[in-house]
Image: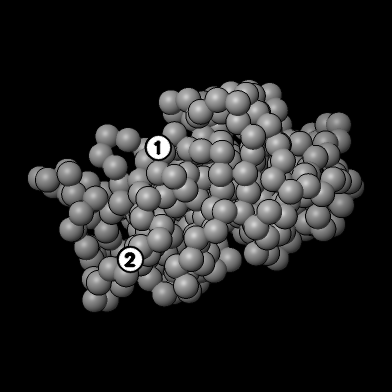
Amino acid sequence: MKKTVFMGAFVGIILTACGGTTTAANLGSPSPGASTSSAALNCSLPISTDSGQQSGFLAISSGKYTTDPNAGSASNGMSYDRPHHRWLPVNWAQVLPDGSAYAYSKEASPTPSRNEIHIVDVSTGSDRMIYNQGSYHVIAYRPEGIYVDNHLSGTDASNGLWLLDPTSGSLKAYPAGQQATWGWIAAGAAWSYSPNGSRFGSNSFARMDLSTGAVETWFQVASPQPPEAGSKTIRVLGFDGSHPLVQVYVDDHTSEIWRLTAAGQATRLPDLALGPLSPPQSIADSHGTWLIAADRSVYLYANSAFTRVAIAPAVASGWYVVAGACA
């Protein structure tokens, strides 16, 4: 591996089963970092199609996949809450770490220019609205509160970051970050692929310290032209502890992958076939960081390398994503 500061280039920028059906997958030829260690990973990985229409468990040691008939209907299986043995209709960042509740946003009725913020108790199913002032969108639910951004109407973009107190309904603003689009909350920080506020992304990647509100550029890539409409430049793949793993889109067949350890400190990792879409949803647990690439390869990042440990089943439309910790 090569240790470099602020390097990279690209031209185009897009950037416990019960019942069910069981299938076996063939690992095929090795990919970067691949080894025979998958046999030692005696755990079951919850995975779901991106639409939530089909969900189940992939046994890493054997490669067998079993659908879960208890996953529910469409959009009910985006995340698996293992403590409560339930599939939830939100991504994992919106679920409290202990699995007891999740937060989501939806358009207010009859005024869709506003969003409602809701909290759902997983055990009881109780759903309560806690805020409906402004176009705020849930990024993450943490013990300290709900991190929200300001959703820009008619776009997939947003700007600014706030912390919503679910009890009082008060909002804490992060003034230094009000121009940026913040996509991830992890390792005591918020992370942005668009620090300058462009809805199409930028060639910079920034970190905001959640305790101080200070914003710092952590990574930049050379770009011969501005981002094109609908494109992103640098996106988070996952986290190695407190260190982001990021994708830099090169073209439909190539992505650069970097591990960031500090501002201006980055290590290039072997490339993966991530495809032309946004980086896949990843989940970190005691084994490492899990993700499913465009070719259906299931990767585990641990010990400074990605290892291909299984193959996700084929699906008629869409693709599979990791939905929870492997246990």
Query: Label 1, on which residue?
Result: 199
| In front of the other: 175 or 187 | 175
Q: Secondary structure at mark 2?
A: strand
Coordinates of residue 289 in the picture (x, y in percent): 68, 55
Coordinates of residue 258 in the picture (x, y in percent): 71, 46
| 12 over 35 or under it: above or below | above
Q: Secondary structure at mark 1?
A: loop
Q: Of callouts 1 and 2, which one flags the residue occurring earlier in the amino acid sequence?
A: 2
Say whether residue 277 is visible.
no
Coordinates of residue 53 in the picture (x, y in percent): 45, 38
Which amino acid type corresponds to the residue marked 2 in the rendered image? Ala
Q: Residue furthest right?
A: 36
The quadrant of the rendering that contains the C terminus is bottom right
Counting every numbered tag in the picture gives 2
Residue sitting at 51 percent across and 28 percent down?
A: 226
Apparent side of residue 37 relative to residue 186 in the rendered image (left or right): right
| 84 over 106 or under it: above or below | below
Apparent side of residue 80 relative to residue 138 in the rendered image (left or right): right
| In front of the other: 16 or 152 | 152
Residue sitting at 35 percent across and 46 percent down?
A: 158
Apparent side of residue 117 relative to residue 260 in the rendered image (left or right): left
